[in-house]
Amino acid sequence: MDMSCFPIFILLFLFPFSKSDDQLTQGKPLSPGDILISKDGVFALGFFSPANSNKSLYVGIWFYNIPESSRAIVWVANRDNPATTASPAALAISVKSDLVLSDSGGHTLWMTKNNVTADEDARASAVLLDTGNLVLRSPNGTVIWQSFDHPTDTILPGMRFLLSYKGRVMGRLVAWKGPDDPSVGDFSFGLDPDLGMQIVTWHGAKLYCRISVWNGASVSGGTYPGNSSSVVYQTIVNTGDRFYLMYSISDDSPYARIMLDYTGTMSLLTWNSYSSSWIATSERPSGGYGVYGSCGPFGYSDFTGATPTCQCLDGFEPDPMNSSRVCRRVEALKCGSKNHFLRLSGMKVPDRFLHIRNRSFDQCAAECSRNCSCTAYAYANLSSAGTLGDQTRCLVWTGELVDTWKTNNYGENLYIRLGDSPAVKCQCRSAGVRRKKEIKKKLMLRYLSASSELGGKNSDFPFVSFEDIVAATDNFSDSNMLGMGGFGKVYKGILEDDKEVAIKRLGSGSGQDNTRKDVLDWLTRFKIIKGVARGLLYLHQDSRLTIIHRDLKASNILLDNEMNPKISDFGMARIFGGNQQQGNTIRVVGTYGYMSPEYVMGGAFSVKSDIYSFGVLLLEIVSGLKISSPQLIMNFPNLTTYAWRLWEGGNAMELVDSTIAGSCPIHEVLRCIHVGLLCVQHHSDARPLMSSVVFMLENEIALLPEPEQPAYFAARKQENGHTRENMDNSQNTMSITTLIGR
């Protein structure tokens, strides 16, 4: 990757480093040549001079224990008012408990402004933490001021970058003026004050790049390049009063930082110890793509390939009469004529939208459908994202669709209005099929090609579409049927490369039967719970080899006509032999919300991983809610959080599905909730074995230990639309279990 746009800072210190502790106290100023070093040596604070000047002095924070030539300045105090070598400066704590940088002539170059008086606290101290946060605090630990509340051009893991407070736009990152000039530059990053929902980069007062539009997805993440055992998470939180952005990294991960550089590029940079350099994991804009409106109206930047490109939205084509990036409709819209809406997935929604509040998905679609000038709409359910007030987000567009892009991850659904002619439908259908097939293949290859679980080989993963399967089996001809199992038929097929395959097609009886939802009374639910528990007990203990399922969830539990549960989908299962108790992987696969914390963060899996998943499943069966159900009470990111708070407050019965709450044995339901919470405890050693789980479920006299607080995970949204969007449930489709990289 070309890193020429990222400045390498050469720190020219006027004096040799002198060792120091991590604190600055009153009467002990910091002078040029002195440094504060955080407790574990991660960060340092001191004076530095950029490479182009040995006369200007700045106070800053930088990564300490990496080569000096690659050290990155993450915070600067006096960026617009440097000290000079001619008038040496010092950083000290004043009698008013302010941090003050002043030169030898007594001129104040920079200072904090606090409301603490000398009488209130005359012994304040400043400490540099291993997070990179410089904290000014009183002797009783009260934080008076901290650098994390006043960032310059960098966001560090653990920093809460406050975007807005009570509707008022707050923080902004401001880039350096040049590669060696820390003064305020031309580019800034923050929340758009006009719309309040999108995070953008400005070039002066002009919009330069729209990074994202908030859609309620609270957590997203990705692995480090070349180091899939480490992951960085982005968290966007809206509490009603506060709207902030935060990044965090998994334990023992290399250093990471988010930086807005002087060229206007917002980058996630991770430290590579082998090359002793910073690597850009992601950057926006990239190669000129992603700059505001760079692909023109009805065009988008496509980031799904190896290199970004400009494409026209489905139903549009390049205008041959215009050499610039202009897309035109294949068929013009006509008011009063029949139109249809095409769903585009993985999109960053366009700019210039109208936000309509308090609408369901159907109402949002209707708002656009009945308005002839409406060209597109997008919907998101915000109820599980901690939002107070309006629980939905309906966006509509009434003109050109400007500045959108497509990614493999973290985009959302955009519904665009098209004409209803056969030509448009054919073009969109064929383009959509090709795109879906390519995207699915890229996603699968991304996680499988480099997996150590595949022997470290760059495997050519055999991606087979449903259309290929139909052709291979002669449309599931009876002449190709090899046999029949409890949940479907097995067919022989021949692929295009003459390779023979066996394909199982689930029968119609193995689908989700919505008509039988009402018959799931408590006795049936309890029967399913105990049946799954016994099934896991067999896999973990009673079979010849210990089997770890690794993807236990509701959709992998099949029910027969008697409602007996059968655990299915062993495609991710692992077998333990001998005395093996635990396995490790650098390629985590499974479903968010069901995966145990030690598996997500460290790749460790054991029988306790399945027990965690069983606990989540048990709570789902009792409550009738999903792990990330939008029906949850606001401010609770998932079901385990909700269940724990109710249990902790003595209100566990409020968790029970209202359709059975009046007819179920209270002691039996409470015992199930109790067992479920024991299974989802944070530490794997605290979770019971399946033999104990079965005993506790089937014996009312069994004594149960008190559960500890569970691990809370906000499920990453793969799809952020209303549930009605995902109801195209047909036998003639292909399903893939999502592989989630850490």
Image: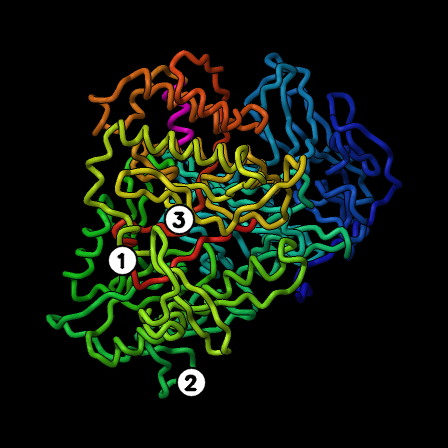
Q: Is residue 50 above or below residue 104?
A: below
Image quarter of the N terminus: bottom right
Q: Residue 214 carries which label?
A: 3
Q: Which mark is residue 323?
A: 2
Query: What residue appears at the point 32 percent right and 42 percent down from the top-left corner?
Result: 559
Q: In this view, does 71 lie above or below 490?
A: above
Query: What residue appears at the point 49 percent right and 15 percent down from the top-left corner?
Result: 705
Closer to us: mark 1 or mark 2? 1
Closer to us: mark 1 or mark 3? 1
Q: Residue 728 carries which label?
A: 1
Q: Specify the amino acid type for callout 3.
A: Trp
Crowd around label 3: few <14 · some 14–19 · many ≥20 (10 Å): some
Q: Residue 185 carries which label?
A: none
Q: Which of marks 1 and 3 is nearer the N terminus?
A: 3
Badges 3 and 2: C-beta atoms under 8 Å apart? no
**Magenta stretch containing residue 643, yes or no?**
yes
Q: How far apart are marks 1 and 2 (CA)?
A: 40 Å
Q: Specify the amino acid type for callout 1.
A: Asp
In which quadrant of the rendered view does residue 565 lie?
top left
Q: Which of 61 and 357 is in front in this view?
A: 357
Please give the range of residues in magenta.
Answer: 638-647
Q: How far apart are marks 1 and 3 (CA)?
A: 26 Å
Q: Which of 190 and 534 is in front in this view?
A: 534
Crowd around label 2: few <14 · some 14–19 · many ≥20 (10 Å): few
In which quadrant of the rendered view does residue 248 lie?
top right
**Magenta stretch containing residue 261, yes or no?**
no
Q: How far apart are marks 3 and 2 (CA)?
A: 34 Å
Q: Which of marks 3 and 2 is nearer the N terminus?
A: 3
In which quadrant of the rendered view does residue 384 lie?
top left
